[in-house]
Amino acid sequence: MSLLKTEVAGIYFENPLILASGILDENGYTMKKILQEGAAGVVTKSIGTVERTGYRPPIVAEVTGGLLNAVGLPNPGIDSFGEEIKVALEAGKPVIGSIFGGGVQEFVDLAIKMEGYGANAIELNLSCPHVKGVGSEVGSDPALVTDIVTEIKKRVKIPVFAKLSPNVTDMLEIAIAAEAADALVMINTVRGLAIDVYARKPVLSNTYGGLSGKAIKNIGLRYVYEVKMETGKEIIGVGGIENAEDAIEYIMAGSSAVQLGTVLYKKGRQAFAEISSGITQFMKSEGFGSIKEMVGAALP
């Protein structure tokens, strides 16, 4: 058995590194390529009911410690996405379909279609910080989160992952509200702002955006640690992972797998192979026989 093999909600991954939603994942061929080059799984672009063009540029800015983005959830709509899933699945590795909506029935309908396309799991985007009426606006309402997760679990057979937002008053309350989910994905981007002092206005066209990258790693770690300790739920950690030690920190905080996103802007697709190699070296030197042995190792 591979030293790096891990499992989340009955889905097996050859290593703990998964491509995060929103990075090179709107096209089936790109997802397939990333899977062939070291990613153990991919999460698709968040897909909605109908096509969205997103916000006008500028939509991404480099800031201290990472990236600030307000892309606006551009996507082709669920009815145009089946072929992309089909192509990505040709790599023979897990493909997780990310969906967003404004209410229970919309989420249910999207989940059913994703399952029909062959997705191995569903990731519920309850955490996008910059689009009104969806994302974190939905994910900050505990009762609505409970209803969405519960109803989807009734209607699909594949695992359901709930991606939670750090932009809430009480993350633990939302995590408990998503109890019916098979796993939690934590965290999405942190709401932020950048100003062009010469133009005397915000850099992004949407004013506010989601901060990703190294700057949010310690926020993500805190939430993974706290939620794992209090709930025991399976967790996929995400936020600011740039090297093997970052990934190991998330695993020791309680994550069974992690997602990579912003690091691909810096290192490209080789980030998966590089981080996998680093984790392997650490495990051998520290005497770990499996990823499972490391999960939650830093918890009391």
Image (cartoon, rainbow, N blue to C red):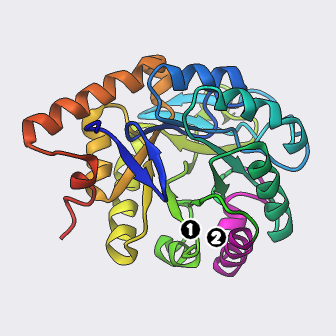
Rendered location of residue 60, percent (x, y): 64, 30
Please tell me which residue is depicted at 74% across the width and 74% down the height of the picture.
151
Label ID, residue 140: 2
Other residues around mark 2 within 10 Å, as few (<14) / some (14–19) / many (≥20): many
Amino acid marked by disc 1: Val
Decide whether residue 120 is among the magenta residues: no
Q: Is the C terminus in the top left, top right, bottom left or bottom right quadrant?
A: bottom left
Decide whether residue 132 is among the magenta residues: yes
The answer to the question of whether label 2 and label 1 lie on touching residues, with beta carbons closer than 8 A, is yes
Is residue 55 visible in the rendered image? The answer is: no
- Magenta segment's dominant SS is helix
Please tell me which residue is depicted at 72% across the width and 66% down the height of the picture.
138
Other residues around mark 1 within 10 Å, as few (<14) / some (14–19) / many (≥20): some
Amino acid marked by disc 2: Ser
Please tell me which residue is depicted at 49% across the width and 59% down the height of the picture.
9
| Residue 178 figure quarter | bottom right
For mark 2, give the secondary structure.
loop
Please tell me which residue is depicted at 75% across the width and 41% down the height of the picture.
206
In this picture, is 112 found above or below 290?
A: below
Q: Tag 1 or tag 2, which sits nearer the N-term? A: 2
Specify the segment rendered in magenta. Answer: 131-154
Q: Which residue occupies the foreground of this view, 186 or 203? A: 186
Q: Is residue 205 left or right of residue 192?
A: right
Label ID, residue 168: 1
Q: Is residue 236 left or right of residue 108?
A: left
Rendered location of residue 71, percent (x, y): 72, 36
